[in-house]
Image: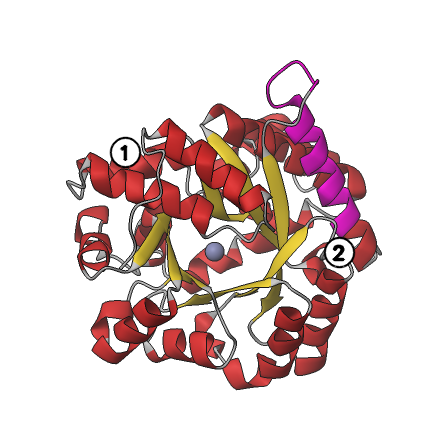
């Protein structure tokens, strides 16, 4: 099965050996053995709370302050995902978190785009053709001012034709404030950027409603509480909003008590558009194929549900046409479903 990963954070998706190497190089740890201990300590575990998970990004982002490091991690992420069956990735990062050594927003974006292009070109191993696509989603962080959010959108809009596909609202959902970012997200939509918002990650379903109504979200990151509010679930269904479900991550943040207790089967039964994503490959020690396996083994989802979520990973991508349609055909063919299903 071929799929796309629509929700993956660059600063949580290192190769372990790269993180170890960068930690020594940056002087965060004196030697490799101590850096390996650091890598072990950084990994998420069950029920950590979102806040405790977010704390660990202080360390990972500290390692991503140079063009070289950004490029390397982006390239490796694309190549590793390709080997896992991923044919399109939408990689998130917040530029402000990578500017500690003085890189400009443009330098940060261009380093990651260059790394992703390098990874895409090398994914198949022969370096001849791009067999995987990857785009960037720039994140506004909860707590930023409206002006800071506007800066993120301006930066993204400058690359709307050249690799930046969308805009995200991420970070500590306890600070959720859709109204503050309404103007910036409106400008992002006008610039043709896709909008996805982390909402309802164990927090109230009202955030999901605000994300859709106030920010124009076409996709919601997590949305684990969507079914707590029938009105919100109806809105999400009516607008065709896609939920980016990250099973392992939701157990780590405490948004779900266990994979087996995740509301994913009920989301599917309610007719909502859902896809699976990794969130943080390194920090959550997962891959996208593992997430699909978990959905089958822990939630007893059948082939039809898994295929449906795989196809959704393509149809909900922020890729422009005709690339999006091409990706969808590729994923459909891989699950033996060439014709688009009838939508009511
Ligand atoms: Zn996320």
Q: Residue at x 76, y 38 (%)?
A: 114
Q: Quadrant of the C terminus?
A: bottom left
Which residue: 79% across, 58% down? Answer: 105
Of residue 114 and residue 76, the one placed in the foreground of this image is: 114
Q: Which residues are magenta?
A: 109-128
- In percent of width and height, residue 127 lies at 70, 18
Q: Nearer the viewer, mark 1 or mark 2?
A: 2
Residue annotated with mark 1: 293
Look at the numbered disc 1 and give the secondary structure of its residue.
helix
Q: Earlier in the sequence, mark 1 or mark 2?
A: 2
Q: Nearer the viewer, residue 263 or 320?
A: 320
Helix or strand or loop: what does disc 2 sit on? loop
184 or 56, nearer to the observer = 184
| Circle on res. 111 | none
Between 255 and 184, the one lying in front of the other is 184
Please name the residue that numbered disc 2 is placed on: 159
164 sits to left or right of 80:
right
Q: Residue furthest left?
A: 300
């Amino acid at each position: 099965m071929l799929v796309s990963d629509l929700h993956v954070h660059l600063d949580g998706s290192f190769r372990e050996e790269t993180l170890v190497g960068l930690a020594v190089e940056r002087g965060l740890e004196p030697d490799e053995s101590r850096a390996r201990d650091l890598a072990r300590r950084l990994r998420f575990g069950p029920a950590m709370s979102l806040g405790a998970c977010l704390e660990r990004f202080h360390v990972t982002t500290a390692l991503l302050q140079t063009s070289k490091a950004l490029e390397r991690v982006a390239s490796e992420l694309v190549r590793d995902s390709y080997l896992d069956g991923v044919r399109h990735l939408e990689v998130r990062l917040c530029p402000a978190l990578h500017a500690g050594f003085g890189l400009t927003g443009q330098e940060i974006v261009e380093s990651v785009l260059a790394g992703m292009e390098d990874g895409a070109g090398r994914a198949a191993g022969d370096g001849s053709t791009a067999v995987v696509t990857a785009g960037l989603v720039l994140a506004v962080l909860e707590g930023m001012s409206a002006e800071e959010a506007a800066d993120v959108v301006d930066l993204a809009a400058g690359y709307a034709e050249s690799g930046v596909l969308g805009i995200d609202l991420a970070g500590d959902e306890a600070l959720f404030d859709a109204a503050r970012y309404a103007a910036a997200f409106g400008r992002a939509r006008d610039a043709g950027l896709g909008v996805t918002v982390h909402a309802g990650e164990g927090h109230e379903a009202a955030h999901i409603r605000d994300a859709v109504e106030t920010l124009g979200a076409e996709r919601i990151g997590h949305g684990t509480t969507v079914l707590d509010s029938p009105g919100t679930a109806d809105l999400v269904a009516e607008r065709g909003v896609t939920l980016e479900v990250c099973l392992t991550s939701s157990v780590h943040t405490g948004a779900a008590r266990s994979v087996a207790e995740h509301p994913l089967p009920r989301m599917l039964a309610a007719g909502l558009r859902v896809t699976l994503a990794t969130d943080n490959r390194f920090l959550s020690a997962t891959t996208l194929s593992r997430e699909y396996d978990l959905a089958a083994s822990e939630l007893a989802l059948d082939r039809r549900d898994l295929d449906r979520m795989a196809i959704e990973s393509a149809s909900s991508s922020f890729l422009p046409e005709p690339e999006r349609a091409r990706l969808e055909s590729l994923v459909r063919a891989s699950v033996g479903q060439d014709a688009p299903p009838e939508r009511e």
